[in-house]
Amino acid sequence: MTHLPQLKIPATYMRGGTSKGVFFRLEDLPPSCQAPGEARDKLFMRVIGSPDPYAAHIDGMGGATSSTSKCVILSRSSQPDHDVDYLYGQVSIDKAFVDWSGNCGNLSTAAGAFALHAGLVDPSRIPDNGTCVVRIWQANIQKTIIAHVPVSHGQVQETGDFELDGVTFPAAEIVLEFLDPFDDGEEGGSMFPTGNLVDELEVPTDVVASGRLKATMISAGIPTVFVNAEDIGYQGTELREEINGNPEALARFEAIRVAGALRMGLIKTAAEAATRQHTPKIAFVAKPKDYRASSGKTVQASEVDLLVRALSMGKLHHAMMGTCAVAIGTAAAIPGTLVNQAAGGAARAAVRFGHPSGTLRVGAEASLEGGGWLVKKAIMSRSARILMEGWVRVPEDSF
């Protein structure tokens, strides 16, 4: 029997926000994987360890959650006035596909830091001490992200005292600006694809007895479907175990997601949702109330403007996806949305919301222009750190 050797591919394993991923420079990938296609998808699946019927990712770099089954490619930018192009792949855990339909806001933080680590930013733009402004072209959604990366002695500063709920240890703060986050690449031509701030979705009667469910559907940061927690029998204080251990509940959330995807024009048939798991996100909101976060600490109602729980790749997220936080901040800034109503209904430029791991603040600049809502930027702080660097190995016949 012929035994093929393993390939060594330069890679860096990084945490960004509350996610982790395997980062590559485009030029370091095998030639057949430097362009989009089957070879690249197969490589990333093998790196992560998917598809895995055991849902454990024992034979790969993934962590068997949507937050840890991610790969990223960076290269010098093809766009004017940008430093790097950032391409993100969400690897399915139990199915053989990679979803390229959206961005990861958490790993956008790591993309800014990795750009410096990997030598992809002009050295003349990197201060000895201070902040390097990294101009990122998010290639999945064709948008600009500005990362303000702290620098010490000419290198990325990774340690610090910035605390982020959902991350165990403090680190250095990286401020992200998502410019013009409305995803105009999606069908519908509007930040609100249906033209409405609130719609009624037709859903199965095991989701809502009436078969009608109020929803705010927005394409900002990432296409997201927001519903009221109380309309689907929840409080907005739930933790992962209460949702993810209930297959019937997950099926109901998927039914809502499919109904929203159809109304937003993201898919043409319900069957297409199976190959578009990364988007749209489904989230449920509630007015503030006390709850105990997954860390054990109590979040007081007075500390937050609203509560939000969101699902990613079919499971309740342990904290909050960065792109979904952009959607939350944007929707909260627009009076009349379900998110804004849960936050008290007033116009606002920033919102602090409670999620399963604690709280997060996100700001958005939204304005009503020409009869439609526009958002110029959304801002939030995250952190990033290299966990390991060197080479990732995959069997030679993996792709």
Image (cartoon, rainbow, N blue to C red):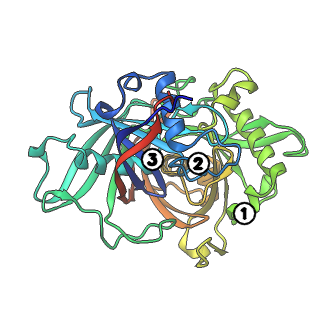
**Residue 333, image x and y in percent?**
50, 50
The three-letter amino acid code for the residue at tag 2 is Ser
Q: CA distance from mark 1 to mark 3?
A: 24 Å
For marks 1 and 3, give the one nearer the viewer.
Answer: 1
- CA distance separating discs 2 and 3: 13 Å
Numbered mark located on residue 257 in the image: none
Which structural element holds mark 1? helix
| Residue drawn at the location 75% of the way across and 63% of the way down | 242
**Which residue matches tag 1?**
241
> Seen in the image, is 273 located left or right of residue 86?
right
Nearer the observer, 244 or 387: 387
Query: Tag 3: Cα neighbours inside 10 Å, few (<14), some, or many (≥20)?
Result: many
* Residue kind at label 1, given as amino acid type: Glu
Q: Which residue is mark 2?
A: 66
Q: Quarter holding the N terminus?
A: top right
Q: Are marks 1 and 3 in contact (CB under 8 Å)?
A: no
State which tag comes first along the sequence, 2 or 3.
Answer: 2
Q: For the view shown, which residue lies furthest in the front direction?
A: 1
Location of mark 3 (residue): 105
Q: Are marks 1 and 2 in contact (CB under 8 Å)?
A: no
